[in-house]
Amino acid sequence: MTNAPAALAKPRSQWADVWVQFKSHKGALVGLFVFVSLVLFVFIGPMVWTKDPTFINPDAVTMIKTRNKPPSIEFPLGTDQLGRDMLARMMKGGQTSIAVGLTAMVISITLGTFVGVMAGYFKRLDNALMRLTDLFLALPLLPLLLVMAMLFRAPLSKAFGPEGGTFLLIVVAIGLTSWMQAARVVRGEVLALKEREFVLAARSIGTPSRRMILRHVLPNVMSPIMVAATLGIANAIITESALSFLGLGFPPDFPTWGRLLFDGAEYIQQYPERVIWPGVAISLTVLSVNYIGDGLRDALDPRIRGR
Amino acid sequence: MLTFTLRRLMFAIPTLLFISLLIFLLVDLAPGSPMSQIPLTVPPEVRLKIMEAMGVNEPVMVRYLLWLKQFFVVEPLVLWDHWFSTEYSAGMQRIVSWQSRSPVMDIVVQRLPQTMTVIGTSYVLGVLIALPIGIYSAYRQYSWFDQLGTFIAMIGFSVPTFFTGLVLILVFAVNLHWFPSIYDTSLRVTDWASFMQQVKQMAMPVMVLALYNAAQISRYMRSSMLENLGQDYVRTARAKGLTERVVVLKHVVRNSMIPVVTVIALGIPSIFGGAIITEQVFRVNGLGALLIGAIQGSDLPTVQTLTFIFAVLIVLFNLIADILYGLLDPRIRYD
């Protein structure tokens, strides 16, 4: 009896268990690998490949000579119509695109979780907050995003600089228009959690609402939040590149993958690779993030495995 | 069911009013609004005249109410007059575009056919592709067909439509010269040759949108089928000695279609939004192109009206989906 506990294997924590499950999903593992390599390429790459992505040769003759170059040792992905190095631009563009995706996701998840927890936990707020969510779900999002981009771009660029202003605008606009799904899912989970015995136990010893939410509710709704978060990254990256593609995103000096695609579309007949590279980068990122989300969902919720 | 429908309709009205107010205020009070863009060198009295001519010298609320009246009273009356050749709307002021100085609704009516043919065909095609794929994937779960279907569906909704569109242009227009890369709106279908030309120019935008829609709908169909295939009534049907064909196609598919039909209804307004991008890629002269043009030209009445039309579509199809769900599934009782 005394040495029985020693014979038992060390108990796995919940997240170690999730990782074991996650590893068994091949697509998710490949997705994770691809996503990490893309992030490394984009953020570590510029330290190795130190060409300036916005460098235009001031000498006009050299500039014209280095325009529209095919791939070579000096320019592995060629140059664009102003002689700028495409590899460096791809890295810089990826930094912005991935940063937009992550920041917008954080905003939308924070907002969605807040609304969801409030609506699920406090009965008084439930009706009002859910009506608000329904209202937001009925908004035509892409047209509204386009309108917001048109109206607020100039003033924000003036206030925060062209890059900072546009970044702020796009991130906030995407965050404000994509929190509804997360809020609905979180609310449902919170409503179910509230009926559980441990919540009753915690309440019966007089735990105040604030600690109740932070200690008991939030940690238990982490799994749907994480799944919503991965899908949120994919959604934000696609939305940003769509805005840039319609010419209402970042200004041309600050490349993003969507902007590069937009610039390359004009030259699609002569230099198709300029469309292919950024397009493949966007697609790979979104695809890998979606696979990670799939794997996470399976790992976190065994009931829906294989659906 | 009737009371439920009425209740939902009653709720749709304040929703739409609120959304219209939101759109109106957002466009109107934004710091970048074109009313603040009249150059400072313009003398104040001329500026006042310009503002008056554009109808923007009134307070916001007055203009909002006027716009509401124009949208909900004048425009339907114009439509009524057009259909029944009456004269109710004579002398009433319509919503006028700042760019073209013609009524916004007239432009919308001009642009609608292009959008409808492309979107309608692609959605129908997408559904027709998605349903068999979803059914077969679920029936043979984890088979190579299912794995392939899952993979293609994943690609279908991960690859953004503007990239698929450009790749198709590259392959079919630039390299193979099969299809034109630009949509010709003035083409009239009169004979077989012009019909083939229409088919050719619609092929690429329809392919892009159909792939995207099929990817999503086939996933819904598959998971709905999987849910039903494990039910007791399927075992009963097999035990009765029904053929596999009857069990799957008559019993399971019918029941699995219930949630899928609502998903299909819910997806219609969102593909109008998605079509904005596709129309831009293939230069289809439809509603999306109209919106982009109006945004770039700071044509506020057109932007407000179009955005609101999109909102009406969303609310309408949400309502239709809810009612369909109640009609198709007798287990759902709203009252």
Image (cartoon, coloured by chain):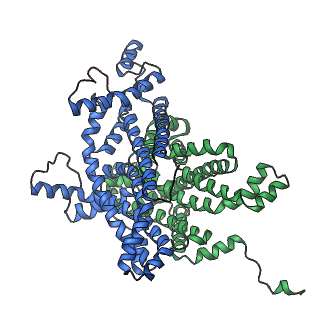
Chain colours: A green, B blue
Residue in the image at 69% along x and 59% along y: A193
Is residue B92 shown in magenta? yes
Location of residue A110 in the rendering, given as x and y in whole percent from the top left corner:
63, 51
Q: How many marks?
A: 0
Q: Is residue B93 left or right of residue B312?
A: left
Residue at 35% across, 61% down: B164
Above or below A302: residue A201: above
The answer to which of A70 and A137 lies nearer the viewer is A137
Residue at the far top: name it.
B45
Q: Which residues are magenta?
A: B86-93
**Residue B296 is one of the magenta-drawn residues:** no
Residue at 33 percent of width and 62 percent of height: B126
Q: In the image, what residue occupies the spot 30% across and 59% down?
A: B124
Residue B45 percent coordinates (x, y): 39, 12
- Residue B260: horizontal and vertical position, in percent? 42, 61
Q: Where, by quadrant of the figure, is residue A238 drawn? A: bottom left
Question: Is residue B198 found left or right of B15 in the rendered image?
Answer: left
Which quadrant holds residue A277?
Answer: bottom left
Q: Is residue A88 visible?
A: yes
Q: Nearer the viewer, residue B318 or B327?
A: B327
User: Which is more toward the observer, A277 or B293?
Assistant: B293
Q: Does residue A121 appear to the left or right of A172 in the view shown?
A: right
